[in-house]
Amino acid sequence: MKIVMAIIKPFKLEEVRDALTAIGVHGLTVTEVKGYGRQKGHTEIYRGAEYAVSFLPKIKIEVAIASDQVDKTIDAITSAAKTGQIGDGKIFVINLDHAVRIRTGEADAAAL
Amino acid sequence: MTFTRPTPAGWAVLAIGALCAVGFADAAIAQTAAAPAADAAAAAPAAAAAVPNKGDTAWMLVSSALVLMMSVPGLALFYGGLVRTKNMASVLTQVFAIVAMVGVVWTLYGYSLAFGDGGSMTPYIGGFTKAFMHGIDANSTAATFSNGVVIPELAYFVFQMTFAMITPALIVGAFAERIKFSAVMLFILLWVTFIYFPIAHWVWYVAAPDDVAAAAKALAAAADGAAKTAAQAKLDEVTGAVGWLAGAGALDFAGGTVVHINAGIAGLVGALIIGKRTGYGKDLMAPHSLTMTMIGASLLWVGWFGFNAGSNLEANGTTALAFVNTMVATAGAALSWLLAEWIVKGKPSLLGICSGAVAGLVAVTPASGFAGPIGALVLGLVVSPVCLFFVSTVKNALGYDDALDVFGVHCIGGIIGALGTGILVNPALGGVGITDYTNITGNNAGTYDFVTQMIAQGKAVGATLLWSGIGSAILYKLVDIIVGLRPTVEEEREGLDISDHGERAYNM
């Protein structure tokens, strides 16, 4: 099992969700995050105070999937979240040791 | 989650407080009850002379409510939106608590100090003759600017109360996010008592304006030397019973000096003495909600019609003039801040247009009943770029942390307004000219003289800066000794919402 974690542009969330649903991934955790990569921040001016804002708002999504679904999932996220501009985000794949569905106690693949 | 019950000691303090309050009330009732004989004698001739107009009375009560709305929620939201989330409840509480405390103080002795008869001290301070509202009932009247026109004294009392409430509340913006609540409350209690009440008295107290007007007219009409001497003696006698700045001929229609310069300089002194916020210049201190700030600024604009037009104390043509001036100066200033910022900083901002509107309101305050609408518009267009220069360039160059720009907007805007009033009152510039008794020095009642007027305006500005600046510095030091001004660095970092009030503005 794997966790696919992707940092994407906030306005791409709905498209990514639709793409994942289409390939049979049913379940997704979303977090509003801030961060920076190669995309430059911007300057905010409040009267005399100028602030360089380098942490930009992004959306982090996490999906837990069976290992054989990793490529399909990455493709789905990539095609849905891509704009071609700097700041489209990144995808990280992490090993997942164990999973449990709280309601039933089902474990691992059955819990996904 | 656990609830902590108030300690028995806490309840004991509350019980003692309640007993004291009852004691106060008893004393007040006793004083009022002892008074009626003296009152009736004093009030009888006035009651026969003039009866308040229902329209004037209604307008003054509505104006009082509008000015209250400027403080809560207007100013509270305007300021609250500009601080960080962790200090939102702190700013809202400070403004609300100041409004409530000054309401109590004004009733107990503030009105008397500001608008009472101070005997031999009358040019400088009212006495305690009206303390605990002694001698004021539903039939008491207060003079207006029109000879022979009066309004209920209770309406005047509550209208002036709302001014005393908002002025100290303006100050908290200068040291927002880094002062203990106890220090704010103690400082403001001392500040209104020793700074605001005297200055309001200096500028606005005229015991019997109708008598001054009559004496000035008599002097102007006096034919020969002996008659002139007699008339002058009479004029000197009645002008002895006015605040000294009013007597010097300073024009301040609705409180440019008393409210804005006064609060602005007290704020700057506070920002300097208390010091910068922890992390100033390093941490992100962006406003947490410009939405709140916009709502607050808009409420201030609407409420300011009560502040300025209400300051005419009647509902007539001058009231409409003050109303219109308040509209056009503010529109002009909002626009000119936006444009200046667009040119200098590259983008027109919401905070900019809101700041410009407030700067315009501040500047037109002393001029509202004296300038013509085009004069007011020019004043509005001029004030914003100057204030923008102060809040960005000057503040950064000098490095003081006037957190919400109380000095840059209120003091500087107030000074431009006060000096501008001396220019724009000129009938040649569309102003109303000098009304019959306001400029009573130099025998020039009824005429406008640029130099005389600017000297008077300068006196009012200088006296306010000095009294409020030096007096506030002493009071800050005193408060620092008694309760301490600043929270610890840890408390400041955590936010005053939690450290002072034990709650958050937002639980989301």
Image (cartoon, helix red, strand yellow):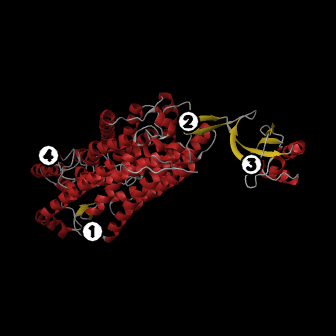
Q: Are marks 2 and 1 in contact (CB under 8 Å)?
A: no
For this orientation, the residue located farthest to the front is: A105
- Residue A2 higher or lower than B376, as above or below: above
Say yes or no: labels 3 and 1 on the same chain: no
Tell me which label, 4 or 1, sits earlier in the chain. 1
Can you see residue B48?
yes
For disc 3, the neighbor class at 10 Å (few under 14, some 14 to 19, many from 20) is few
Q: Position of residue B93 (x, y in %)?
A: 43, 49
Q: Residue at x 39, y 52 (%)?
A: B431
**Distance from the alpha carbon under mark 3 to that under mark 1:** 69 Å
Residue that label 2 marks: A49
- Residue A29's tag is 3
**Distance from the alpha carbon under mark 4 to that under mark 1:** 30 Å
A26 and B239: which is toward the camera: A26
Q: Using residue B244 as the reference point, say whether residue A31 is left or right of it.
A: right
Residue that label 4 marks: B120
Circle 4: residue type: Ser
Q: Between tags 2 and 3, which lies in front?
A: 3
Tell me which label, 2 or 3, sits earlier in the chain. 3
- Residue B52's tag is 1
Circle 1: residue type: Pro
Q: Position of residue B233 (x, y in %)?
A: 12, 49
Q: Position of residue B77 (x, y in %)?
A: 49, 51
Can you see residue B205?
no
